[in-house]
Image (cartoon, rainbow, N blue to C red):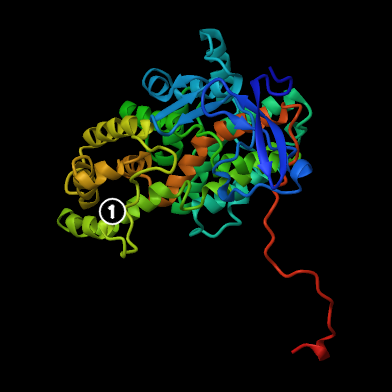
Amino acid sequence: MDAKTGANIKSGKVVVGDKETTFPIYDGTIGPAVIDIGKFYAETGMFTYDPGYTSTGSCESKITYIDGDEGILLYRGYPIEQLAEHGDFLETCYLLLYGELPTAAQKADFDNRVTHHTMVHEQMSRFYQGFRRDAHPMAVMTGCVGALSAFYHDSTDISDPTQRMIASIRMIAKMPTIAAMAYKYSIGQPFIYPKNDLDYATNFLRMCFAVPCEEYKPNAVLARAMDRIFILHADHEQNASTSTVRLAGSSGANPFACIAAGCACLWGPAHGGANEAALNMLREIAKPERIPEYIRRAKDKNDSFRLMGFGHRVYKHYDPRAKIMQKTCHEVLSEIGLKDDPLLDVALELERIALHDDYFIEKKLYPNIDFYSGITLKAMGFPTTMFTVLFAVARTVGWISQWKEMIEDPHQKIGRPRQLYTGATQRDYLPISRRK
C-alpha cells in the first residue's frame, strides 16, 4: 500500500535506450491502473509527450468515475441514473462536497445554508451595467464570477477550512442568481430577487422568467426538469474546465477566480457550448424533409459538415446521462404542448433516424446529453446564448468540490506541464541594420 495515495502499489519496468528503470504502478478502487512517472525526467532525461493529456492521470480523486466503454458515470460511487431519478440537485451537491449522501437533518441544514446565501451584494447590480446589452451572457457570467472575490473578502483565505466551505456554499448559492441576472440584463428586464421559500430549481426559473407586474406561477414539471439537468451536469471527472479550475487553484488563487477560469474554459464550443452548437445545427437543417440530405453529408468523409450532439469523446457506448435527458426532454415537450415548431420537429425526426440507422448504430453515434438538453432548454424558454450559462450553474459544485479536494491534498503541487520544444536553437542577436 502506497503511503502517498493509499492505493495498492506494484512496479513496472521501462526501457529507454540501454537503461532499464522501474516506476511504481498504482491500482485505484476501479478503473485502469496508473504508472507514476513523476521521476521519469530525473531517471531518463526525457519528458513524456501526451497532447491533450488523454493518457495522463493529472491527480488522484475520489469524486467522479467514468467508464466510457460501458457507459457508466458515478458520483462518489452512486450511479448518475439513481441520483437523477430519486434525489435532487442540492442532495447531489452535498454528496459531491462531503462524500456521502446527507441524513434528513444534514439535508435540511445544507438546504438552509444554500438558500440563505442566494442573494448577491447589491452593488453587483451596478457591475452588470458596465456590459453592453448585447454582450453574450457567458461573457457577463465570467466577469461577474471573477468579481465575487472583490465583494466577499471573508472567504478568500484558502488555508482556512471554514472560509473554504463558506466560499463553496456561496458559489453554489449565488451562481443561479448571477446567471439569472445575466439573462435579465440581456433582455432588458429588471432583476428578480431570490425567494427563500422556493426550492433551488424553482427559484432559478422564477429569477429568469418572472416579471414584477404579475405573479409567477411555478411549474413542477419544468422545475423537476431543471433540477435534473443540474444533476446530470454537476461533475464529469477531469474534463477541460475542471482541469482548468484545478490548474488555477494549484497556484493558490482564490476560489472565485478559479471558478471564473472554469467558466471561461467551459465557454468553448467543443466543451460547454456543444448543446448550443447542436441547436444551431438543427436550425441549419431547418425542416424534417432536409434531414436525409444532412445525413448523407455526415456520412461523406469529404464533407466538412458534422452532426452535433451525437457521440461522445469519452463514452464509446451510450452516454448514461442522455437516457435520463431523453426522458426529461419528452416530459417537458409533453408539458409545454408545443406545436408547429419546426426545430423540435427536426430534432425528434433526427433522433428517430439516429436510433435506427445502421450507420449511426455501427459508429455508436447515439444522441448525447447535449442533443437532448439543447432541445429541452429551448422548449423551456431559454435562448441558445444561455445554454452554457446553465451548464456553468450546474458544474459549479463539481468545480468547487474538485478545487476543495485539491487544496486539501497535502501532496498537491502547482501545475507545470512540460513541452516538446521545436523552435529555433540558440542564436545571437543582430542589430537591425544587419538583418536581411
| Vertical placement of residue 113 versus 177, above or below | above
Q: In this view, does 106 lie to the left or right of 210?
A: right
| Vertical placement of residue 334 versus 436, above or below | above
The answer to which image quadrant residue 122 occupies is top right
Q: Is residue 375 left or right of residue 62?
A: left
The residue under the point 31% across, 64% down is: 303
On the image, the x and y values in percent for residue 361 come to: 25, 41
Q: Residue tagged by mark 1?
A: 282
Furthest-left residue in this view: 289
The answer to whether residue 69 shows anywhere in this view is yes
Front residue of this view, candidates 423 and 14: 14
The residue under the point 55% across, 53% down is: 139
The residue under the point 43% across, 43% down is: 313
On the image, the x and y values in percent for residue 199 come to: 45, 24
Q: Is residue 240 left or right of residue 45?
A: left
The answer to whether residue 124 shows anywhere in this view is no
The answer to which image quadrant residue 222 occupies is top left
Front residue of this view, candidates 136 and 22: 22
Amino acid bearing label 1: Leu
On the image, the x and y values in percent for residue 280 come to: 34, 55
